Amino acid sequence: MKHLLLVPLLAGLSAGQAGDYSPRYVENGAFGPGELLEFSVEYGIVRAGTATLSVTGPEQHEGLMAYRITANARSNPAFSAFFRVDDTNAALLDIVQLHTLLFSKSLQEGDYRNSEEVFFDQEAGTAFYPEEDDEDERLVEIPPHALDVLSCLYYARTLPLEVGEAYTLDCHTDNDNYPLQVTVLREERIRVPAGTFDCVLVQPELVGEGIFDQQGEILVWMTDDERHMPVLMRSAIVIGEIACLLESYTEGTVIQVDNPFGDE
């Protein structure tokens, strides 16, 4: 039951071909530093733990300014008695082009342990895995403006998300590239511990081979406003279903970023 809590819900949210890179400007009115989303994680009818999504920064990375996106997932003491989860995933997301600059993860799930750091060179079209044992997999090609699985969620929040429309994202994870289609199914009003929200229901689907051992559909309810804040996420796992329900939230400060590329 790897990736038990939060990341499989995000991974459902990804590719194109490496090369053909050109700078882009992405207008972001959805999120900013200071945003904190706190979720209850439920496995069936059992409260399994908690998860948080946060945005901080901007901070400098190799001469570029980036938001730091962090996802934490922890099992509660009762659930930890038979399956302990302590996961942290983090990404640096360029504030102008909204593509990944750096991704890291530290996973502790039962007896499973895994940590990784990946450096994205968007202009060169490569991702570098410094701890990779296989030399052929240490430096791999990525499509233009590739996103890690966590940043896919945040990039998707900047899209119009109009009902009936489908959007394709370019995701890179675990040394490979995956196309991901995000389809907006319908509008729904959703009640969660944090309140009642008018939402759009989004279904992300990997095109081709999946990243994780996904046994069924992934569904994400996002607020039907400019923020597109996720309030409910559901995913089938090997046995049963797991859900993240928004318990509380703090809105961040959206930073107005000028387009440095002009009419390029």
Image: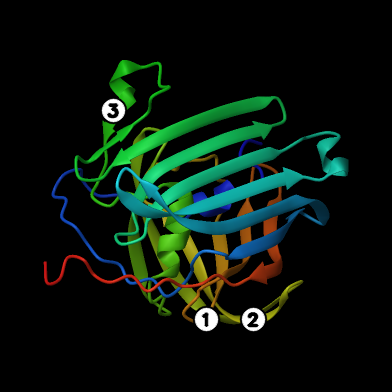
User: Residue 14: in sight, yes or no?
Assistant: no
Instruction: Provide the residue designation for mark 1.
Output: 224
> Label 2, label 3: how many angstroms apart (C-alpha)?
43 Å
Compared to residue 224, the image places residue 114 above or below, namely above
The amino acid on which the numbered mark 3 sits, given as a three-letter code, is Leu
Quarter of the figure with the N terminus: top right
Q: Amino acid at mark 2?
A: Phe
- Residue that label 3 marks: 139
Q: CA distance from mark 2 to mark 1?
A: 8 Å
Provide residue 97's location: percent of width, then percent of height: 29, 59
Is residue 221 among what the camera can see? yes
Rendered location of residue 116, percent (x, y) = 49, 30
Q: Between disc 3 and disc 1, whose residue precedes?
A: 3
Residue, x 61% and y 34% (percent of image)? Answer: 107
Q: Decide if residue 144 is on the left or right side of residue 77.
A: left
The answer to whether mark 2 and mark 3 are in CB contact below 8 A is: no
SS at mark 2?
strand
The local secondary structure at tag 1 comes to: loop
Dot 3 falls on a residue whose secondary structure is strand
